[in-house]
Image (cartoon, rainbow, N blue to C red):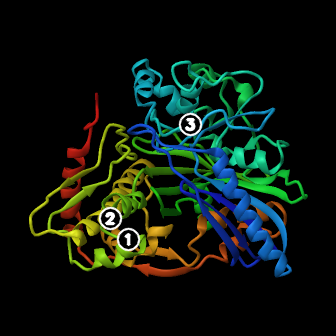
Amino acid sequence: MAVVIAIDAGTTGVRAFAVDEQGRPAGWSYREFPQYFPRPGWVEHDAEEIWAAVEATLAELRQRLAEAGQSVAAIGITNQRETVVVWDRRTGRPLHRAIVWQDRRTAARCEELAAAGHLDLIRRRTGLVLDPYFSGTKLAWLLAEDGGGVKADENLAFGTIDSWVIWKLTNGGAHVTDPSNACRTMLYDICDLAWSAELCDLLGVPSSCLPEVGPSSGRLGTTADGIPISGIAGDQQAALFGQACFADGMTKNTYGTGSFVLMNIGATCPEPSEGLLTSVGWTLADGTTAYVLEGAIFVTGAAIQWLRDGLGIIKEAAEIGPLAASVADTEGLFVVPAFTGLGSPWWDPYARGTIVGLTRGLGRAHLARAVVESMAYQTRDVVEAMASASGRTVTTMRADGGASVMDVLLQLQADQLQVPVARSAMQETTALGAAYLAGLAEGVWGSLDELSGQWSADAEFSPRVAQAAADARHREWLRAVERSRSWARP
């Protein structure tokens, strides 16, 4: 039996994940890689360490598949999206550490662009906001003499992590990306579905360094031993695809390092929406394109890592759910985990993490619950902005990602949204989406309807508290958010 392999190159590690023809897991391998924090607000990765993790996980998984007599029909790639890699085409070596999507070093440059009146152009062309989250100003910093000092010549190659991984998998044979990643660079026109010469000139980025943009589902290259690489999607769009949210209005939330709420809004590119992002969800081999509204929440699961690694109040991330559920409420404690600023719908790069409502009787369980509650509150902020902008009411939400295993979180989420929250039976929806895109291109699956039929829920959570009670708690949360905002402004 043939399987499809997804390479899921995330923010903290790489997973190689095999899926069979029924969409069931057929094996996996995982490696973490280091995080680098050279200055406050700066976050970097070593692209060679990411590639080493890809090589190791892919080799380990393929060995297991070979021992089981399973062949590989295709490979799909999904990745942390806005992280920037630059390398030399001749040597294939990175010219600087990768600048990660969480990095805040270009906040001042974004403010300069806004003050110069460029926000409207960027909103109309890209669907994005002027925030250091996105790739364009990171690349401009790398090319600046007073920044990364990378030389802009004919040998320079730029890419997000998908481009870097495919370049390495094809031994330099393919320098490609797809619209779901290109649209997050601040250099791509989401209406014309092409790189924008106007935006490249604005940011001082030579178009010669950019990858070719191919479909999200379609053959993009082959590995050295002839396996087709036939799918690419940024991690959040891949999760939406893996959740089978193919119809207009379907919505998912992935609770990962950050959380990302995406709503499929169909084939027509809309006008920009206040506080939200408009992105390309995917483009299929026949040219069919789906657009999405997105709310990007920078820190959710990363706050659990902070409780574990920074404060030491838990030893394993898995302890957070039972600890949070061990108290009935936080007794007025709120944690706003704005460690790298606030994303949707606030877009405040100068916000910082805040704890309010501390009293002597509170303990580690209350702090743990406050962190879990912050995930639900931030999601509600995004969903309300999304409903206002789109005119569509979210009637149910499909949930996935590591933190979605916590029943206490999904119950809190249902209570805050006042709609059912369905947890996918397949938790690795990001990898599944990349596998689906690749397998669809190679005929492993014949249609979106066939893929829809493979989705099922592990559990569904309905609201248990009244709207008024949920609203009262949310108002207190908003008071805490206001205290976190603009804290680090120079």
Q: Residue at x 22, y 45 (%)?
A: 482
Question: Residue 397: in sight, yes or no?
Answer: no
**Residue tagged 2:** 312
Please rate how many residues cluster around mark 3, counting C-alpha atoms within 10 Å: few if below 14, some from 14 to 19, many from 20.
many
Image x and y of residue 427, in percent: 56, 73
Name the secondary structure under disc 2.
Answer: loop
Quadrant hosting residue 77: bottom right
- In primary-sequence order, the first of circles 1 and 3 is 3
Name the secondary structure under disc 1.
Answer: loop
- In primary-sequence order, the first of circles 3 and 2 is 3
Disc 3 residue type (three-letter): Ser
**Residue tagged 1:** 315
**Residue tagged 3:** 135
Q: Is residue 323 left or right of residue 91?
A: left
Q: Do tag 1 and tag 3 residues touch (Cβ < 8 Å)?
A: no
Cα distance between the residues tagged 3 and 2: 33 Å
